[in-house]
Each structure stands twice: as structure tokens, then as C-alpha cells.
Image: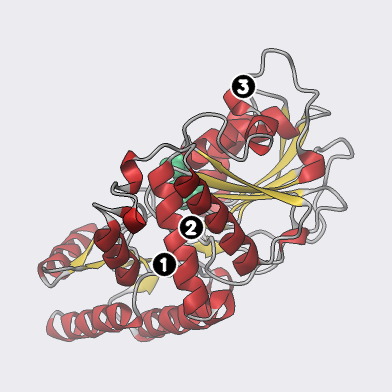
């Protein structure tokens, strides 16, 4: 077995102990005589898997009782549509556009109502987070939308926007469970799990109960209604059983290492190793403002596309995979999610240091 250090932005690396547990349980899940992939989602044994996954997530994040936890398919992308379809009552929403993902979400929301872009960092290729302390929030806005960690650009909100009393909806896909989160600051938090939690195929939506409406337009597709999922324990139809099972394992793993505070401490240590190197490097530069640098996604460049490509090739040959940057930023991007061990970040930095010395 030769596992590489996988810096992919998503689907992404997962904790090895979780993969090993899954492997051990693959053919015969706890005496059921079958794999979780093969069992009915209506079976007792699967219901227990789903119930435990939800309970463990609630415990990890301290989710208040008046929030529902929904497991929905369709990725974060489906939420770009479901959010306006379900939350736009007045038909107005305010979007803060700090990168590719919030831009996509805003573009989709325009199909359902009036979208105000109340702040954006588009003028500098999304390399910073605008001041969100006094935004022109629309009196009629049903919600204010952010992407809290922009996976492609590598920025993160250090402070939540002042929504002037409107509810906040946050896409946490690439930072989900990376640090403690005060759920009651939000109307809704959601994220695709394939970045920082488990395998691709589900979104977890944490939504305040009073925002789940029943009075939606008659022609709203049944799958696109939050009440469908909320009223059926996320099993109106066949859920992604496998992803729920694996996410549940990751929740238990996070609990076993001390929960989200411990995870955050480790994530800060990991990011510091990489950012300290970039700050001291003559060859590599980070691409975003220091104060808003992401703990999860770290883009950096040499300033020369050919050199960037050579570095990517050299890292790959040395056992560091998926470091090629997104085309809109170029260069390299190291995604150092929860499951990337600190040894992986240290080994990458050691390699880049040596590369810089040898190629100066
Ligand atoms: C990856 C990503 C998405 C899109 O996720 P899909 O599950 O592929 O739809 C949306 N938002 C953020 C922040 C992401 O990182």
C-alpha cells in the first residue's frame, strides 16, 4: 500500500483510521451479513447508523434543538437553487460575493427573485474579504448569503457580516467541522461533505425550524422542499446511505480526538507551518490578504506559469498529489483539510524549501 499525501480540494483525503474501519466492516456490517451499501434504508440497522450520525453531529457542533439536520443529495450546487426556492418569501436576497462559489450561488438565485450583491471582492480576483460591518441590507431581504470559506481563492470570513437582523445563510462546504461554530448565529449552514468530511454525494443542511416553510408554490418539486426532507428524517426517498454511514464514522473520529476545538488547534498549527514558509519564501507567494487567509485552502504562486507547472510536477513525483492550482488563480493550491496530517504539511514544506534552494 502506498498512500500519497493528497492535497485535493475535493473529493479529498479522509482520516486513515476511518478508511480502515470501513474496510473492516465492508463485507459484513456488524453481523448483518451485508455491506452498508447493500442494506435497505428502511432497515433498523441503517436507521441506527443515520440516527447516530445525526446525534454525533449535533453533539460535535452543539446544534440547538430548534435546528433540523438534513442529509440531501445533489451537492452544494443543488442548494444554490433550493435556498432561494425555499427561503425567498419576499423574493429578495442579499448576496456577498467573495469568490467563484458565492458567485455561482448568486447567479442561480437570480432565477427565483431579486438578488442584491451587497458586497464583493471581484475587483481584486477575490483575494480579500470586503468590510461587511455596514452593508446596504435590503429591508425586504429574506436572507443574507455568504460562502464562508472560498475553496478556490483561499479566503475565509474572520468575522461574520452584520446582517442587520436578517438571517444569515452560509456555505461552509470547505470548512465544515474545521473549528467550533456557533450555530445560532445562522439561519442555515450547509455544505457538501466531500471537502472536509466524507465521500461525495450528500450535503448536510442545518436549518432553523421556523425557516422551513410549507406554503411554497404548488409547483415546487417535492425533492426541492426542505419540509419534504425535514418531515421524513431525510429519507423521503432513498438517501445516499453510504455517504451517511461514512460521515457518521468521521463524526465519531472527530469526537475521539477531542472535538472541534482540538481539530481547530491542529488546523491552525498545520496552516501556520505552510504560511510561515510562504511568508519567508523568495520563490513562492500566497495570493490573498494575510488577515483572511483560509486554514483549509492555501493557494500560492511563483509568478511564472511555467515554473508553477514544474513545481507541481516535482511535488507529484515526490508523493504529494493534487497541488495544481485552480485555473482562475493559477499556481498551486494545497488543501489541508481536517484529515491532512500535520506530517503531510511539514513534509510538503520541507520539500518546497529544498526545491527553492536547489532552483534559486
Ligand atoms: C465544492 C464546493 C461547492 C460545490 O459543491 P458540489 O457538491 O460539487 O455541488 C460549493 N461551495 C463550495 C464552497 C465548495 O467548495
Which quadrant holds the N terminus? bottom left
Residue 183 horizontal/vertical position (percent): 71, 61
Which mark is nearer the camera, 3 or 2?
3
Assign a secondary structure to mark 3.
helix
Which mark is nearer the camera, 3 or 1?
3
Which disc is residue 174 wearing? 2
Question: In the picture, residue 197 is in which quadrant?
Answer: bottom left
Label 1, on which residue?
A: 337
Is 305 above or below relative to 210? below
Question: In the picture, residue 226 is in which quadrant?
Answer: top right
Mark 2, ligand 1, within 8 Å: the answer is yes
Q: Outermost residue toward the top?
A: 219
Q: Is residue 328 left or right of residue 128?
A: left
Which disc is residue 38 wearing? none
Label 3, on which residue?
A: 222
Please name the residue shown 70% across and 61% down the image. Answer: 63
Q: Is residue 235 left or right of residue 210?
A: left
Residue 176 horizontal/vertical position (percent): 53, 60
Amino acid at each position: 500500500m502506498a498512500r500519497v499525501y493528497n492535497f485535493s480540494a475535493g473529493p479529498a483525503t479522509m482520516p486513515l483510521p476511518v478508511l480502515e474501519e470501513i474496510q473492516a466492516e465492508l463485507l459484513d456490517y456488524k453481523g448483518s451479513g451485508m455491506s452498508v451499501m447493500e442494506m435497505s434504508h428502511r432497515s433498523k440497522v441503517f436507521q441506527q447508523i443515520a440516527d447516530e450520525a445525526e446525534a454525533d453531529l449535533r453533539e460535535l457542533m452543539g446544534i440547538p434543538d430548534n435546528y433540523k439536520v438534513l442529509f440531501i443529495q445533489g451537492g452544494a450546487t443543488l442548494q444554490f437553487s433550493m435556498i432561494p426556492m425555499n427561503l425567498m418569501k419576499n423574493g429578495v436576497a442579499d448576496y456577498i460575493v467573495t469568490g467563484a462559489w458565492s458567485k455561482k450561488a448568486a447567479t442561480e438565485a437570480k432565477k427565483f427573485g431579486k438578488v442584491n450583491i451587497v458586497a464583493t471582492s471581484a475587483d481584486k480576483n477575490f483575494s480579500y474579504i470586503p468590510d461587511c460591518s455596514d452593508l446596504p441590507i435590503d429591508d425586504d431581504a429574506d436572507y443574507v448569503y455568504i460562502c464562508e470559506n472560498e475553496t478556490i481563492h483561499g479566503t475565509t470570513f474572520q468575522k461574520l457580516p452584520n446582517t442587520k437582523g436578517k438571517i444569515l445563510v452560509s456555505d461552509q462546504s470547505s470548512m465544515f467541522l474545521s473549528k467550533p461554530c456557533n450555530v445560532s448565529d445562522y439561519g442555515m449552514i450547509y455544505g457538501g461533505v466531500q471537502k472536509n468530511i466524507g465521500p461525495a454525494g450528500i450535503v448536510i443542511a442545518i436549518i432553523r425550524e421556523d425557516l422551513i416553510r410549507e406554503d411554497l408554490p404548488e409547483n415546487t418539486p417535492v425533492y426541492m422542499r426542505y419540509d419534504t426532507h425535514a418531515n421524513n428524517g431525510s429519507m423521503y426517498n432513498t438517501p445516499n446511505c453510504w455517504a451517511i454511514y461514512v460521515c457518521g464514522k468521521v463524526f465519531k473520529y472527530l469526537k475521539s480526538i477531542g472535538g472541534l476545538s482540538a481539530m481547530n488547534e491542529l488546523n491552525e498549527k498545520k496552516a501556520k507551518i505552510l504560511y510561515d514558509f510562504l511568508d519567508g519564501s523568495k520563490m513562492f507567494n500566497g495570493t490573498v490578504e494575510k488577515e483572511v487567509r483560509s486554514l483549509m485552502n492555501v493557494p500560492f504562486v511563483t509568478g511564472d506559469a511555467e515554473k508553477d507547472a514544474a513545481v507541481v510536477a516535482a511535488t507529484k513525483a515526490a508523493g504529494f498529489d493534487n497541488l495544481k492550482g485552480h485555473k482562475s488563480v493559477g499556481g498551486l493550491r494545497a488543501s489541508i483539510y481536517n484529515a491532512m496530517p500535520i506530517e503531510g504539511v511539514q513534509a510538503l514544506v520541507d520539500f518546497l524549501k529544498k526545491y527553492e534552494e536547489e532552483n534559486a
